[in-house]
Image (cartoon, helix red, strand yellow):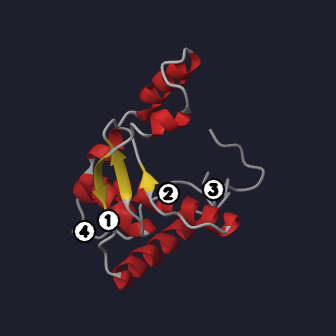
Amino acid sequence: GLFAPYWRSDARGCIVGMTATHSKNHICRAALEATAYQAMDVFDAINKDSGTTLKSLKVDGGMTANNLLMQFQSDMISVPVVLPQVSETTAIGAAFAAGLAVDVWQSVEDIKSMWSANKTWKPSMEPKNRACYIKGWKKAITKSFGWVEENVVED
C-alpha cells in the first residue's frame, strides 16, 4: 500500500518510464529520489493541514551520507536540509534524556545550546525543473494504484 498522504491500500511498487537506455544506476537513483518525493508529499500535507510552512529540515541517520539525496531533498521541499554534528540523534537523544533525569543538564535549553550544524544543503534547482520533476512523480504515483482487486486474497 501507499500511506500518507495518499492512503491507498491498493497501491503497489512499480518502476515506470524506463527505456532501453536505462541501467541499474537509474533504478538506484530513482529509489533515492522516491524517498525525497515521499517526504515532500508528507511535508506538503503537513503544511496544508497545519497552515505552517517548513523553514528547514533537520536530518539524521545513514541516508544523510548520500549528498545527492540530501541535495535532491532540499530541492524538492524548497528549504535547507541541515545535518547536525552528531548525525545519530536517536542515540544522543537517549543520552540527553538520561542526563536530564540525573541533573547532568538542568533544562532542555542547556541541551539545545549544544546543537550545531555540520552541513547544510540549500535548494538550487530551477523552479521550472522542480515543477517538471514533481509532475513526473505525481504521474508515476497514479500508476501504482489499483493493483489489488476486491475480494481477492493475496499470497
Q: Which residue is mark 1?
A: 122
State which tag comes first along the sequence, 1 or 2.
2
At 34% from the left and 80% from the top, the residue drawn is 129
Q: In terms of secondary structure, where does tag 1 sit?
A: loop
At 55% from the left and 31% from the top, the residue drawn is 107
> What is the distance, in whole Å, between disc 2 and disc 4 at their CAs?
29 Å
Identify the image quadrant of residue 145.
bottom right
Which residue type does callout 4 highlight?
Ala
Compare residues 32 and 73 and report the one nearer the observer.
Answer: 73
* Residue 155 in the image, given as x and y percentages of width and height: 62, 38
Q: Which residue is mark 4?
A: 20
Mark 2 vs mark 4: give the one in front. 2
Which residue type does callout 2 highlight?
Ala
> What is the distance, in whole Å, between disc 3 and disc 2 at their CAs?
10 Å
Work out which residue is located at the far bottom of the displayed protein and give it.
Answer: 128
Mark 4 vs mark 1: give the one in front. 1
* Residue 3 in the image, given as x and y percentages of width and height: 63, 53
Mark 1 vs mark 2: give the one in front. 1
Q: In terms of secondary structure, where does tag 4 sit?
A: loop
Compared to 107, does 43 lie above or below? below
Q: In terms of secondary structure, where does tag 2 sit?
A: helix
- Label drawn at residue 39: 2
State which tag comes first along the sequence, 4 or 1.
4
* Residue 140 in the image, given as x and y percentages of width and height: 48, 69
